[in-house]
């Protein structure tokens, strides 16, 4: 479903992503983890076509992803680390905008909207302008917008930041069920226990380079450690630990 | 403590000035020099001449109007800056987290705002008026009285601004108030400009129509009398002290209680069934643009001068009275309509397109073709500019008593001009849009502004050529000439629209600024 081939991104002299190779299959919940500034967001932006790679390519559903590939975008969704919403729309109008952009059927839109609003406890809270929402509310709305058309691949960059415990748990359960239905989730997170709990495949990136890739069990064999946190710290030279 | 806060504020302003970059600093210096060289001496000499030459009977009305104008304009200006400085920037909680009292903070901010947004304007006015009165009535005490009077007005203005801001801080969202004031500010700027334009025609006629003043300044600002002056000065100082004390009380109370920043008033917007309907992507994009425009007064404030342009053009088309005939010439109307539509469409097209930079990543994450976004932008700009010009110039046509055929021609010309200019504006707007966190309404970079100005010069030159050609032609020839000269660019504009669509597909080159 997703194929990343020798992906590179250079900003002047700085190589943000170096020769990244991996594949993500159908029905996988892929956790893409790494310390701050390791190239996670840059990679995810290249995978969603928002950033042009310096070299290498990203294939989605067997087709190369580029900014103008509208048909590919129809099948994916992306929630950035900072929700990028239109502040002067209210929540209902924003969701309507998203549904129209994805050309959803009216009945499907209404049904999915109701289901997701209940899931994230957003019912009755969407009447105000988005610019008035708290970070958590914006994050929930961005997630509803991303899930509303049931994308084949869902890209989530730090989706749990700002979510309350209940929504966090609901999202977790939802993602587990979502991949069971054959859809794919590509997730970046600093929440290692979340990755450990729900990911079917994990890739650790450090300084733009792949350090390890595989299931949790495979990673435990590759590096010494009882938990993903131990493995992560060992492979990233204890980044963040003094 | 007040001195410490003022010193910190000065330091902060100085650091901001230093961090601005050489080009910007030079630009500001040039603008300040131009202001000091042109409008300032002009306004100064106007005030000086008026004060010297007006009949003594009219002096009270004149000073009253001057004071009221200053109160209205400077209070609006002060409210805008107080909101920006004390509510939007959130530096009040920062100061109050230190061992600083709300009272000290209020007086420091009050002195700053009174100096920067009232005294800096009113002191030169008091000097000009005072010197003129002192020369005219040969009494130098009038200069001191004038200074005290305008200083008092300055304190009243700043107090009024604080009272308006903090009395409504619990009821109205500060951000919205600031937006509304920017809009009012832009509107008043245009109105002041039009007033000056009208004044330029006949200053004598204007002074004759001065209303009777409810307050007489006789004995205080002219015909000097010691006892009246003492009563006046006491009253002015008393009023200023009462106002400042009231402002201090209200502001300190608001500082302690906190205020409404965004307006979580609990009032929910209605989301009717219409909004729930899934529509075509082009329609939803246009809806989004409409909401982004009408829900922010600051957006409207930026566009307002261009929407008031038809009024100005109607005025210069024949109502200026310069011809003295009172009749409207159809050629002038046609040229005004084309010129006005071109200017309006060019800027609005550029501005609307550049606005997409703000949420470009989100737009591009959606399955939207560049051509869909470009077409929606094109239609949105046409729908929000062409009808305005059509209505305005239909009124002009009606007043001109021209033939019905001329109205058809007028409408075709407005439409063709907009069809031509909007894609050019969109090209300019998509070239290098700016996303500024400090000033979100600044969306076009310097080069784009230069390009718009250059395009306008070209348009004006072409209009001049067209006028020359039209003067030598009549009737059907003239109509064929005008329509023909606009059809070709309108066709070319379709090609430009495709270029804009490609830019949407490829991605904008966006400049992010602090």
Image (cartoon, coloured by chain):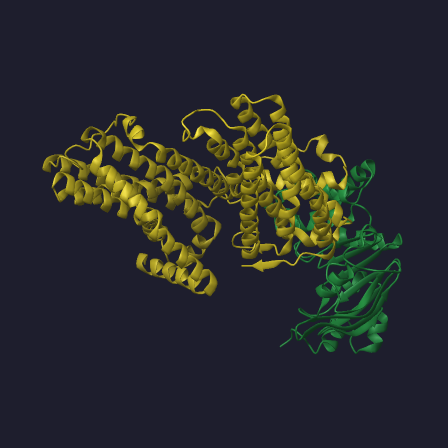
Chain colours: A green, B yellow
Question: Vertical placement of A210 versus B221: above or below?
Answer: below
Say left or right for A184 vs A78. Answer: right
Residue nearest the viewer, comparing B75 with A179:
B75
Residue nearest the viewer, comparing A68 with B158:
A68
Which residue is painted at 27% across and 44% down in the image?
A: B45
Residue B147 image position (x, y, % from top left) = 21, 45
Question: Vertical placement of B189 versus A233: above or below?
Answer: above
Residue B208 image position (x, y, % from top left) = 28, 27
Residue lying at the far left of the rendered structure: B226
Residue A128: tell me if it is visible. Answer: no
Say left or right for B189 vs A197. Answer: left
Residue B31: tell me if it is visible. Answer: yes
Residue nearest the viewer, comparing B175 with B200:
B200
Residue B72 image position (x, y, % from top left) = 36, 37
Residue A134 image position (x, y, % from top left) = 61, 49
Task: Give the quadrant of the C terminus of chain B.
Answer: bottom right
Say left or right for B242 vs B226. Answer: right
Residue nearest the viewer, comparing B4 with B438:
B438
Q: How many marks?
A: 0
Task: Give the quadrant of the N terminus of chain B.
Answer: bottom left
Q: For residue B436, which quarter of the picture?
A: bottom right
Residue lying at the far front of the rendered structure: B472
Which residue is painted at 64% across and 55% down in the image?
A: B431
Question: Vertical placement of A66 versus B103: above or below?
Answer: below
């Amino acid at each position: 479903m997703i194929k990343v081939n020798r992906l590179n991104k250079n900003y002047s002299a700085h190589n943000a992503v170096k020769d990244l190779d991996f594949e993500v299959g159908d029905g996988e919940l892929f956790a893409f983890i790494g310390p701050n500034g390791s190239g996670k967001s840059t990679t995810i932006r290249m995978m969603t076509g928002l950033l042009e790679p310096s070299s290498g390519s990203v294939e989605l559903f067997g087709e190369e992803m580029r900014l103008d590939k509208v048909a590919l975008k129809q099948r994916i969704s992306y929630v950035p680390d900072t929700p990028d919403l239109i502040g002067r729309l209210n929540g209902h109008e924003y969701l309507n905008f998203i549904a129209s952009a994805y050309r959803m059927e009216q009945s499907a839109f209404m049904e999915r909207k109701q289901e997701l609003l209940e899931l994230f406890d957003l019912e009755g809270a969407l009447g105000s302008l988005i610019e008035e929402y708290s970070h958590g509310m914006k994050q929930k709305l961005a997630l509803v917008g991303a899930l509303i058309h049931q994308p084949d691949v869902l890209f989530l960059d730090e989706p749990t930041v700002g979510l309350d415990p209940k929504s966090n748990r609901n999202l977790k359960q939802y993602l587990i069920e979502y991949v069971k239905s054959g859809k794919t989730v590509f997730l970046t997170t600093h929440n290692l226990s979340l990755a450990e709990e729900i990911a079917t495949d994990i890739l650790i990136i450090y300084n733009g380079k792949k350090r390890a890739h595989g299931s949790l069990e495979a990673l435990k064999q590759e590096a010494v450690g009882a938990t993903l946190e131990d493995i992560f710290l060992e492979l990233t030279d204890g980044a963040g630990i003094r | 403590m007040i001195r410490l806060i003022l010193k910190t504020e000065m330091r902060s302003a100085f650091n901001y000035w230093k961090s601005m970059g050489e080009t910007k600093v030079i630009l500001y210096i040039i603008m300040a020099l131009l202001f000091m060289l042109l409008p300032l001496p002009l306004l100064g000499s106007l005030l000086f001449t008026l004060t010297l030459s007006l009949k003594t009977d009219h002096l009270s009305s004149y000073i009253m109007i001057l004071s009221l104008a200053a109160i209205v304009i400077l209070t609006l200006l002060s409210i805008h800056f107080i909101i920006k400085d004390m509510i939007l920037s959130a530096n009040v909680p920062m100061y109050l987290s230190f061992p600083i009292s709300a009272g000290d903070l209020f007086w420091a901010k009050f002195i700053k705002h009174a100096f920067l947004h009232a005294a800096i304007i009113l002191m030169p006015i008091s000097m000009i008026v005072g010197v003129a009165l002192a020369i005219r009535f040969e009494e130098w005490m009038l200069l001191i009285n004038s200074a005290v009077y305008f200083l008092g007005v300055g304190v009243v203005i700043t107090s009024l601004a604080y009272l308006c801001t903090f009395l409504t801080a619990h009821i109205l969202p500060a951000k919205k108030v600031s937006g509304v004031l920017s809009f009012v500010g832009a509107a008043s700027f245009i109105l002041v400009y039009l007033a000056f334009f009208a004044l330029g025609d006949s200053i004598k006629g204007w002074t004759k129509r001065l209303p009777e003043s409810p307050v007489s300044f006789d004995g205080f600002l002219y015909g000097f009398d010691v006892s009246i002056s003492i009563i006046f000065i006491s009253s002015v100082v008393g009023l200023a002290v009462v106002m400042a004390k009231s402002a201090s009380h209200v502001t300190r109370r608001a500082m302690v209680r906190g205020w409404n920043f965004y307006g979580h008033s609990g009032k929910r917007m209605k989301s009717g069934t219409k909004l729930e309907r899934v529509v075509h992507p082009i329609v939803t994009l246009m809806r989004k643009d409409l909401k982004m425009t009408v829900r922010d007064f600051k957006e409207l404030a930026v566009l307002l001068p261009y929407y008031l342009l038809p009024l100005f053009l109607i005025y210069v088309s024949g109502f200026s009275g310069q011809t003295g005939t009172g009749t409207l010439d159809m050629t002038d109307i046609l040229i005004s309509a084309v010129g006005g539509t071109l200017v309006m469409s060019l800027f609005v097209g550029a501005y609307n397109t550049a606005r997409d930079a703000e949420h470009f990543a989100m737009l591009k994450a959606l399955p939207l073709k560049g051509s869909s976004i470009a077409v929606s932008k094109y239609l949105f700009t046409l729908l929000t500019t062409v009808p305005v010009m059509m209505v305005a110039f239909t009124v002009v046509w009606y007043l001109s008593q021209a033939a019905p055929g001329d109205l058809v021609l007028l409408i075709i010309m407005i439409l063709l001009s907009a069809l031509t200019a909007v894609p050019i504006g969109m090209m300019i707007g998509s070239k290098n849009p700016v996303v500024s966190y400090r000033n979100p309404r600044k969306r076009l970079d310097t080069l784009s502004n230069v390009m718009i100005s250059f395009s306008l010069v070209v348009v004006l030159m072409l209009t001049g050529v067209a006028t020359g050609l039209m003067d030598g032609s009549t009737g059907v020839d003239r109509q064929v000439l005008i329509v023909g000269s606009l059809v070709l660019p309108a066709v070319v504009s379709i090609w430009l629209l495709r270029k804009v669509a490609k830019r949407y597909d490829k991605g904008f080159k966006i400049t992010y600024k602090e």
